[in-house]
Image (cartoon, rainbow, N blue to C red):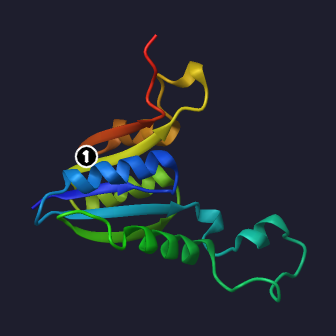
Amino acid sequence: MATVVAGWDGSEGSERALALAATVAAEGDTLLVVSVVPAGLQERSFLEMLLPTIDVSGLIKPGSFTDRAKERLEARVKGLKTRAKVEAVVRAGDPADEILTLLQERDASHLIVGFKSYEKHLRYELGSIADKLVRHAPCAVTVVRWPAAQAR
């Protein structure tokens, strides 16, 4: 029984990575879907970050970035079509470091992440998070590119 990990941040690239992970994970496998909140934001709300000098406590629903990330991730994986057992995992810290730690803790066999190239000259390069994961992961890594690199 294998453990497949999919990185998810709500982007189109992460959606495509999650779709692939759902098909790769076999019956009896565990599919861990992980979302990482930057460490400096884990206990703050988005509005508090935007307006740090204004008391917005009466204007916003209580909850931190971590709470919101967990709600979004759990809503996303609910009903995910896969044969594997699905677990939602939210971590706080550096995204690459947190995913690498999770891979080791859970003895993962495969990591699937998305990547989006914003500029034409970058379409053959990986982003810093994907690059770090490819270089340091203790398991196989699949990077799902979005949009797919166009042929010349």
Q: Could you classify mark 1 by the number of other residues whose Cα lies within 10 Å: few (under 14), some (14-19), or many (20 or more)?
A: some
Residue situated in front as seen by the camera: 28 or 55: 28
Image quarter in which the N terminus is found = bottom left
Residue situated in front as seen by the camera: 85 or 141: 85
Residue located at (58% from left, 60% from top): 38
Q: Seen from this angle, which residue lies furthest top?
A: 152
Q: Is residue 58 above or below residue 96?
A: below
Residue 111 vs residue 147: left or right?
left
Instruction: Please identify the quarter of the rendering in which residue 135 is found.
Output: top left
Residue located at (44% from left, 53% from top): 97
Residue 17 vs residue 128: left or right?
left
Residue located at (31% from left, 71% from top): 87
Q: Seen from this angle, which residue lies furthest bottom?
A: 58
Q: Position of residue 41 (x, y in %)?
A: 65, 66
Badge 1 amino acid: Pro
Q: Is residue 75 above or below residue 40?
A: below
Residue 133 vs residue 55: left or right?
left
Instruction: Please identify the quarter of the rendering in which residue 6 is found.
Output: bottom left
Q: Position of residue 20 (x, y in %)?
A: 29, 48
Instruction: Please identify the quarter of the rendering in which residue 65 is found.
Output: bottom right
The number of numbered badges drawn on the structure is 1
Q: Position of residue 48 (x, y in %)?
A: 78, 73
Q: Position of residue 78 (x, y in %)?
A: 36, 73
Residue situated in front as seen by the camera: 98 or 21: 21
Residue situated in front as seen by the camera: 121 or 139: 121
In what element is the residue under mark 1? loop
Say which residue label 1 marks: 138
Q: Is residue 130 above or below residue 57?
A: above
